């Protein structure tokens, strides 16, 4: 079976079945400068949704604790994975040791002046910086971005342009959204970094994804070809028996 035939099959599969948000949506041709983002949670949500890694559907992770409200569109960048390359960069920049990746796609917050009424959507976003967050010894970077072509926020080219009040609101959410009263803090933000460093985190998370899942379509294509060849062999055997 030719590559052209396989490409046609995958195109037809995409028309018939919903793509997995993590694996089936492309990161974007202009990444890391402009990235595709899958939004799971919006500011009006009273529960935290996240994509179920097995099915690709949104599931309820937990209710938002206390008065914590996510202050921006929140989700992840498809075809990214926080593993060894991301953890290595986190240790290099933070000076901390024994940091591992959190085994999740790279988180992203997308700022926009427009009201978005629900999650489970794809948006195009321009990364302008990020938070180097460590959660229980795991690298858990939060990329900060603006909605592509947003009439107001698209003027912010780097995180340094964001007003301190907005940054403080974002920091407060991430430092407290998992914490119960009386518990010791488990999350820390060691640095706020700019656009270029955010691009490097995205590149490394993409590399981690390629190492873990990069040949996914090739494996599926090979499986499909084996099934096709097996079916053809069965037909040939049956013909010989006639």
Image: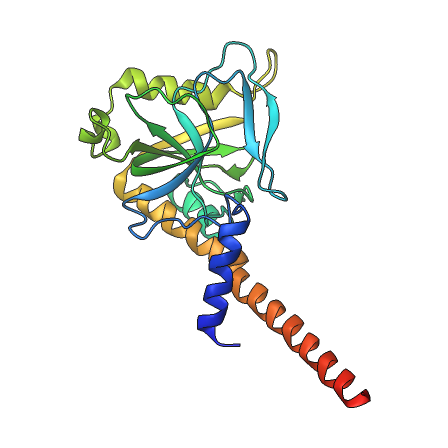
Q: Hey, which residue is sitting farthest left in the picture?
A: 155
Q: Hey, which residue is sitting farthest front in the picture?
A: 242
Tell which of 101 and 220 is nearer to you.
220
Compared to residue 31, the image places residue 64 above or below, namely: above
Tell which of 108 and 49 is nearer to you.
49
Q: Quadrant of residue 112?
A: top left
Q: Quadrant of residue 201?
A: top left
Name the residue located 45 percent from the left edge and 52 percent from the top edge: 85
Name the residue located 32 percent from the left edge and 21 percent from the top edge: 167
Q: Position of residue 214 (x, y in %)?
A: 49, 60
Compared to residue 39, the image places residue 181 above or below, namely: above
Q: Position of residue 203 (x, y in %)?
A: 37, 51
State the quadrant of the C terminus: bottom right
Colouring: rainbow
Q: Hey, which residue is sitting farthest bottom in the picture?
A: 240
Tell which of 191 and 220 is nearer to you.
220
Q: Quadrant of residue 115?
A: top left
Name the residue located 46 percent from the left edge and 58 percent from the top edge: 11
Q: Position of residue 28 (x, y in %)?
A: 35, 49
Q: Is residue 231 left or right of residue 123?
A: right
Q: Hey, which residue is sitting farthest right in the picture?
A: 241
Q: Position of residue 220 (x, y in %)?
A: 58, 63
């Amino acid at each position: 079976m030719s590559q052209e035939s396989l490409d046609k099959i995958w195109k037809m599969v995409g028309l018939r079945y919903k793509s997995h948000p993590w694996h089936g949506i492309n990161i974007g041709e202009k990444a890391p400068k402009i990235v595709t983002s899958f939004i799971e949670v919006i500011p009006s949500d009273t529960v935290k949704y996240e994509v179920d890694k097995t099915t690709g559907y949104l599931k309820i992770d937990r209710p938002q604790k206390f008065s914590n409200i996510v202050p921006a569109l929140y989700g992840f960048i498809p075809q990214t994975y926080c593993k060894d390359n991301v953890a290595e960069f986190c240790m290099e920049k933070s000076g901390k040791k024994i940091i591992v990746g959190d085994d999740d796609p790279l988180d992203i917050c997308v700022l926009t002046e427009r009201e978005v009424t629900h999650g489970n959507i794809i948006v195009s976003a321009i990364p302008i910086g990020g938070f180097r967050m460590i959660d229980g010894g795991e690298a858990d970077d939060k990329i900060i971005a603006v909605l592509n072509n947003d009439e107001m926020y698209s003027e912010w080219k780097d995180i340094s342009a964001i007003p301190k009040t907005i940054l403080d609101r974002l920091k407060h959410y991430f430092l407290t959204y998992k914490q119960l009263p009386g518990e010791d803090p488990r999350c820390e933000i060691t640095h706020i970094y700019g656009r270029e460093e955010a691009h490097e985190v995205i590149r490394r998370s993409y590399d981690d994804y390629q190492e873990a899942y990069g040949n996914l379509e090739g494996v599926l294509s090979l499986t499909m070809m084996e099934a096709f060849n097996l079916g053809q062999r069965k037909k040939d055997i049956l013909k010989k028996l006639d």
